[in-house]
Image (tube, rainbow, N blue to C red):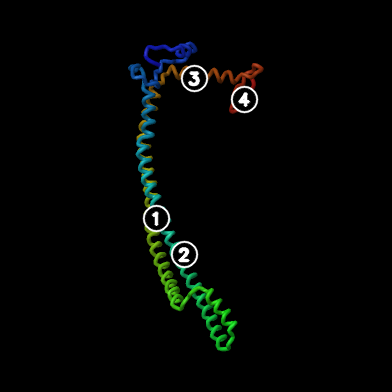
Amino acid sequence: FGAGIASPSTKVLSSVGIDVNDRGGWLGHEDSMSSRRRRCGQSARRYLKKRDFQANILISRILKLLKDYERRLEGIESFVYMHCVGIQVEKHCSKARAKALSAWDKRTEISTAINVATKKKIPKLVSELKIKLDNLPQVSHTTVIRAKESHLTSKTLKSELHKLANRRFGRAQEVSTERVIAIMSLWAKHEESVAIEEVKALGEAIQEVELSVQSADLNLAFDKFTMVQCDEDIRPDGRRISPVRGRSLLI
């Protein structure tokens, strides 16, 4: 409501006995302030501002810590990946060694059989064995030795990767825990500081409300409450209920 302006809705409320003077100052119009008008609206708004004070700053700081925490988690995942790399490399070299050794054993067996068939002068068998030998992978004794060396090297690499990953994982885990503690500490300190200011602002708002209430307002509210209670104490048949020691007696 503006100063000196009576809208139709104001007239309707005034006609039914509702006070529209805004004595408590809930609307907070600067041009309608007077010495008799309190400032409940301004006090309430100050309380809301204190409650949300520096919330954006808190959110931005927590967001930075969460992003750093996310990077730490990605680092931990990379260390787990290092474990997997070591395992897969060792497994691949182990299969390659077994495959080379198996092929070498088969070529050795067939070569031995060819020599025996040649000595016994069985040309047909020799031809068949040579065809089988040609179909086998070209594996030499040197290939088998290299496959063995690669397998042993992969085992060493796997062990070193595991040790390195475990050390890095331990450090990353400690730092990640520190980031979580930092987030909780930052939030707790913010809530503590805001709560102190919020209590002060809320006290001022309550004081303004108390000062805006007059004895006439209390008397009017009490009279209305008494009338409502009297209406509720009358039964439909017109008899009145009188409360005595927690029980209702019909009068």
Camera-near label (4 vs 3) is 3
**In the foreground, 186 or 25:** 186
Report how far apart the C-alphas of labels 1 and 4 lie in the structure.
74 Å
Report how far apart the C-alphas of labels 1 and 2 lie in the structure.
20 Å
Image height of 66 relative to 248, above or below: below
Q: Residue at x 42, y 11 (%)?
A: 6
Q: Mark 1 — residue?
A: 75
Quarter occupied by residue 213: top left
Label 4 Cα neighbours within 10 Å, binned few <14 / some 14-19 / many ≥20: few
Report how far apart the C-alphas of labels 4 and 2 lie in the structure.
85 Å
Provide residue 150's location: percent of width, then percent of height.
Answer: 42, 71
Provide residue 199's location: percent of width, then percent of height.
Answer: 37, 34
Q: Mark 3 — residue?
A: 222
Point out the tag, 1 or 4, that comes first from the N-terminus: 1
Viewer can see residue 144: yes
Camera-near label (1 vs 4) is 1
Image marks 1 and 3: residues in contact by CB distance under 8 Å: no
Provide residue 108's location: percent of width, then percent of height.
Answer: 52, 80
Q: Mark 2 — residue?
A: 88
Q: Mark 4 — residue?
A: 248
Label 3 Cα neighbours within 10 Å, binned few <14 / some 14-19 / many ≥20: few
In the rendered view of the protein, which quadrant contains the N terminus?
top left
Report how far apart the C-alphas of labels 3 and 2 lie in the structure.
84 Å
Report how far apart the C-alphas of labels 4 and 3 lie in the structure.
22 Å
Point out the tag, 4 or 3, that comes first from the N-terminus: 3
